[in-house]
Image (tube, helix red, strand yellow):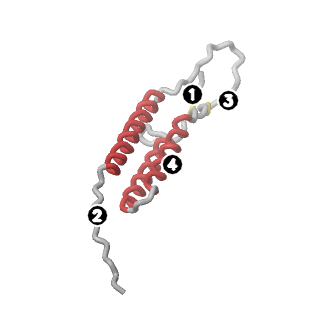
Amino acid sequence: MSDFVEGPRVLGLGLGLFLLILLWSFSLLAVLIFSRMYSGTGVLITSFAIIVTAVMLAMPRSDPVYKDKTVQEDKEPIFRIYDTIFIWKVILSIIMGVFSIGGGGYFFYMYLTDSVYAEVVKKKRY
């Protein structure tokens, strides 16, 4: 069978992995920036990153581009290219899910155990 050309790679890593690294780096930076605000911004950013990661992991890989596109009339056996990194994608998804559930549980635990002290209400005299 003819040789095929894969997409651009740096150190054996493709474009999709670099996009995921960039996405999670920016989401971590945004969560650290918005960590002092009492709003759901960090949760929204993390949720967006999880959804984009799940969509990117669920998308199939593109077909390889063959160097020579000549069609051979011979009845050769069909060679199929399998996604060999599927196992690593699943492991990454499981690890991210476990840490997301753990982080949500820790956030809920800290929310429930946060001490709220009574304050003296100052009365105004008229």
Q: Amino acid at mark 4?
A: Phe
Q: Amino acid at mark 3?
A: Lys
Q: Secondary structure at mark 1?
A: loop
Please state which of the two labelled residues, at mark 2 or mark 3, is closer to the viewer.
2
Q: Is residue 38 visible?
A: yes
115 or 119: which is nearer to us?
119
User: Which residue was labeled with disc 2?
Assistant: 118
Q: Secondary structure at mark 4?
A: helix
Please state which of the two labelled residues, at mark 1 or mark 2, is closer to the viewer.
2
Within 10 Å of disc 4 (Cα), the crowding (few <14, some 14-19, many 20+) is: some
- Residue 48 — which label? 4
Residue 120 point in image, percent of width and height: 28, 70
Residue 33 point in image, percent of width and height: 39, 61
Task: State which quadrant residue 39 falls in.
Answer: bottom left
How far is mark 3 from mark 4, CA to CA?
A: 40 Å
User: Which residue was labeled with disc 3?
Assistant: 69
Please state which of the two labelled residues, at mark 4 or mark 2, is closer to the viewer.
2
46 or 84: which is nearer to us?
46
How far is mark 4 from mark 2, CA to CA?
A: 37 Å
Q: Is residue 52 above or below residue 33?
A: above
User: Which residue was labeled with disc 1?
Assistant: 3
Task: State which quadrant residue 67 falls in.
Answer: top right
Within 10 Å of disc 3 (Cα), the crowding (few <14, some 14-19, many 20+) is: few
Q: Amino acid at mark 2?
A: Ala
Q: Earlier in the sequence, mark 1 or mark 4?
A: 1
How far is mark 1 from mark 2, CA to CA?
A: 74 Å
98 or 21: which is nearer to us?
98
How far is mark 1 from mark 3, CA to CA?
A: 10 Å
